[in-house]
Image (cartoon, grey):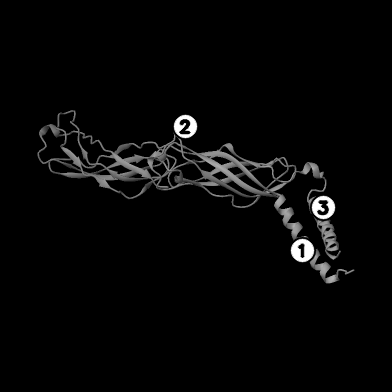
Amino acid sequence: MRRISKRTAVVLGAAGTVLVAGVAYAAWTSTGSGTGSVASTTSVNSTIDPAGLGDALYPGSGTDFTVTINNDNDYPVVVNSISAGSSDVTLGGCAAGTVTSPAVSNPAGTILAHGTKTYTLHATMSATATNACKSQTFTLPLTAAISSNA
Amino acid sequence: MFWWRIGGALAVVITGLGLMTWFGTAESVPVAANGNGDKTFGISDIPGRASSLYPGATGSRGIRLSNPENFTILVQTVTATVGKPADAKGKPVTTCPATSVRVDALPAPVAVPGNGTADLTLVTHMLAGAPDACRNLTFPLTYTGMAVKR
């Protein structure tokens, strides 16, 4: 009858431990699962309001004027463009289009969340403006393209 | 005879070590009630604990891990797969790709007590270039995770 040497017994013991450890680890691994969701916010349109009227105009003259653009969103935005402006008919009968402002692209700056920023535009009165345009206030409808800038 | 003896010795060693491992980590719990660690742990949203996303935003999503076992588990991984977004009526919005949103994986292992819960927060992102179609949508999440017995 052959007998197991001490060296053989040690090797077998070590092998047995490795085997057991592997089995025990695998048995205790488990998985988890579930469902959930996240949501995106919506966007709120901004408004453009007059801020500074600039100098009084006369035929052929120009002046800088300012507008403010607000941001009621929860995130910062950047103004991509402000449209060209053309005046409406005034209460005194000054013809539409007598005062104009050119379009502006990519004005500098970011409007912070729930913030407001002032932008400077330039207005010009037509050289052919009539007497009906004296002492008038001109309203130029403007639109701006705005995008998130987070 | 020789191999029979070796087999018998090895069987004893393995059995002994196996029992030590089993009871050594759950001493007061009967084996029959201990389970084998393969119960699925739960991963669910915590209502009201999520940021609304917008382009470029980094937000958060609160989740709860629920452990159905009666021993502590160590949740090692939790990942969230983003599904196709839908509008408020549940209608899929195909023009907003699911890839517009991503959720970071669990940053570090979390211990969850037996029959208990653990709350944590995952970081969420919306791509800066997400289109307008992604406004005001819900992005479904599918959670998966892995845990080991602590």
Q: Which residue is mark 3?
A: B19
Q: Which quarter of the image is occupied by the N terminus of chain B?
A: bottom right
Tell me if A69 is positioned left or right of B31 in this view. left
Which numbered mark, 1 or 2, is in the foreground of this view?
1
Question: In which quadrant of the rendered view does residue A122 lie?
Answer: top left
Whether residue B96 can be seen here: yes
Give x and y (percent) for residue A33: 61, 42
- Residue A92, above or below A72: above
- Badge 2 crowding class, 10 Å Cα cut-off, few under 14, some 14 to 19, many 20 or more, is few
Element assignment for label 3? helix
The CA distance from mark 1 to mark 3 is 17 Å
Q: Chain of mark 2?
A: B
Q: Is residue B128 left or right of residue A103?
A: right
Residue A12 place in picture, x, y as percent: 80, 65
Residue type at the position of mark 1: Ala
Residue A15 numbered tag: 1
Confirm or deny contact between disc 3 and disc 2 (CB under 8 A): no
- Checking the image for residue A107, the label placed there is none
Q: Tell me if label 1 and label 2 are in contact, CB under 8 Å.
A: no
Using residue A50 as the reference point, say whether residue B92 is left or right of it. Answer: right
Q: Looking at the image, which residue is at 53% across and 45% down?
A: B81
- Residue B150 visible in the current orientation: no
Residue occupying the point 17% across, 40% down: A57
Name the residue carrying label 2. Answer: B90
Q: As shown in the figure, which amino acid type bears the numbered disc 2?
A: Gly
